[in-house]
Amino acid sequence: MKAMRRKPVLRLDVPDDSYKIKEPPKPSGPYPYHLDLTQALGPITGIDQKMTLHMVGDTGSPRPSDFQELVVRELSSHPADFLYHLGDIVYNYGEQHEYPRQFFGPYESYPGQIFAIPGNHDAEINPLSELPYQSLDAYMQVFCAQQAGPVSFSEGSKRLSMTQPNTYWTLKTPLANIIGLYGNTIKFGYIDAEQAAWFVQELKAAQLERRHKALIVCLHQAPYSADTNHGSSETMIAFLEKAFQDAGVKPDVVFSGHVHNYQRFSRTYADGTIVPFVVSGAGGHADLHPIALSDDLTVCDETPIFQHVKLENYCDNRYGFLRIIIERKPEGLLLTGEYYAIPLQAPADPSKTAVLFERFFVPMHYREYAL
């Protein structure tokens, strides 16, 4: 039996797909692209003391997948105030006609509101499409509408459009500032200079509220991964580390999707700060991505950028989702992460329900950060 990996990996055969980068759509709301949770959801009793949210990515699937609807069933069985989608809602090209099958249908029964950042597949354009469209046209109508209302291509879904202000934006909540990034269409992500400057300013602005709010960063393309399909993204690692350095601020936790499994890493900085990097991309796509075996010659983990990064845990053979609880306690805020995994026998046996795979804690003491 191979030993469990303890580091992220890099793929050794990385293709150059930069030709696929697309011009992002124009923002639908004003700078600095904030959305207040209480305005979007209405008043929620006690949410200034405790807030619960689901996180999951890669829920779409170009091929039929029983686990698309099973994930929704299990999400609904573990209540939360809302869902934050980590991208790749619709494969492979984010087309309007795929939204009913891959999103509106499966998520019709989800009881809460759904926020989302785009994944690379949401932003791609089908070169064989008979009807021309621009990158993220459908996503913008579903998640970034000027006002909430029925979506014309939802095939009668009762789920209304969301009013997020941009493809990258900050969700302002009573207990956390959740900064969502847009990594464009390529496998390992791309952030232009305009978004990078905005991100640094958002980190600085969120830092002013750190004694009262957690700081969470979400992006689709996973910075760190030990899987064989994607591996880690040097591009996103470099981008995040530079932004943290420029802002003089590090987040409490970073969440991503893209890789179709669950992984939790810890990144230790020179000042002793430990930031969890969590991947939650097993949301229903027909293919799961395995963790690389220790003797896999297609990947490597001997690089300085992984020197202070440790793979704490993973689940690569079951679908699942995160449930995040943020609570205000006398000693400060506490974030608790719960990852639920669904047995592979669940489609044939309705009694097989999601089980708690692991629980992790992120206490927030709000000391001054310095890289």
Image: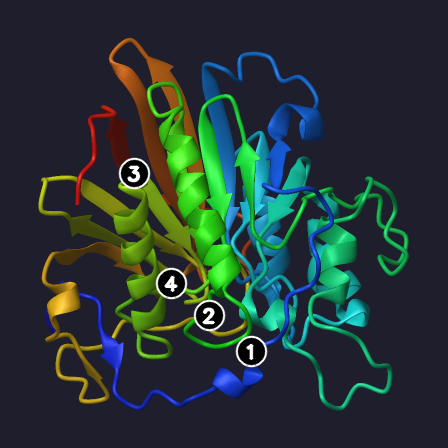
Of the residues under marks 3 and 1, which one precedes in the sequence?
1
Badge 2 vs badge 4, beta-carbon distance below 8 Å: no
Number of numbered tags placed on the structure image: 4
Q: Report the residue marked by disc 1.
A: 21
Tell which of 39 and 336 is nearer to you. Answer: 39
Instruction: Using the numbered discs, state the Cα–Cα distance from disc 2 to disc 4 in whole angstroms.
Output: 12 Å
Badge 1 vs badge 2, beta-carbon distance below 8 Å: yes
Q: Which mark is residue 222?
A: 4
In percent of width and height, residue 347 lies at: 56, 61
Helix, strand or loop status at disc 4: loop
Amino acid type, callout 3: Arg
Foreground tag (2 vs 3): 2
Of the residues under marks 2 and 4, which one precedes in the sequence?
2
Q: In which image quadrant can residue 227 be found?
A: bottom left
Is 224 located above or below residue 321 in the figure?
A: below
Q: Report the residue marked by disc 2.
A: 190
Q: Which mark is residue 9?
A: none
Foreground tag (2 vs 4): 2
Q: Report the residue marked by disc 3.
A: 359
Helix, strand or loop status at disc 3: strand
In percent of width and height, residue 193 lies at: 47, 62
Amino acid type, callout 4: Ala
Tell which of 341 and 119 is nearer to you. Answer: 119
At 45% from the left and 66% from the top, the residue drawn is 258
Q: In which image quadrant can residue 290 be found?
A: bottom left
Instruction: Judge the density around disc 3: few (<14), some (14-19), many (≥20) Cα neighbours within 10 Å.
Output: few
At 50% from the left and 15% from the top, the residue drawn is 48
Of the residues under marks 1 and 2, which one precedes in the sequence?
1
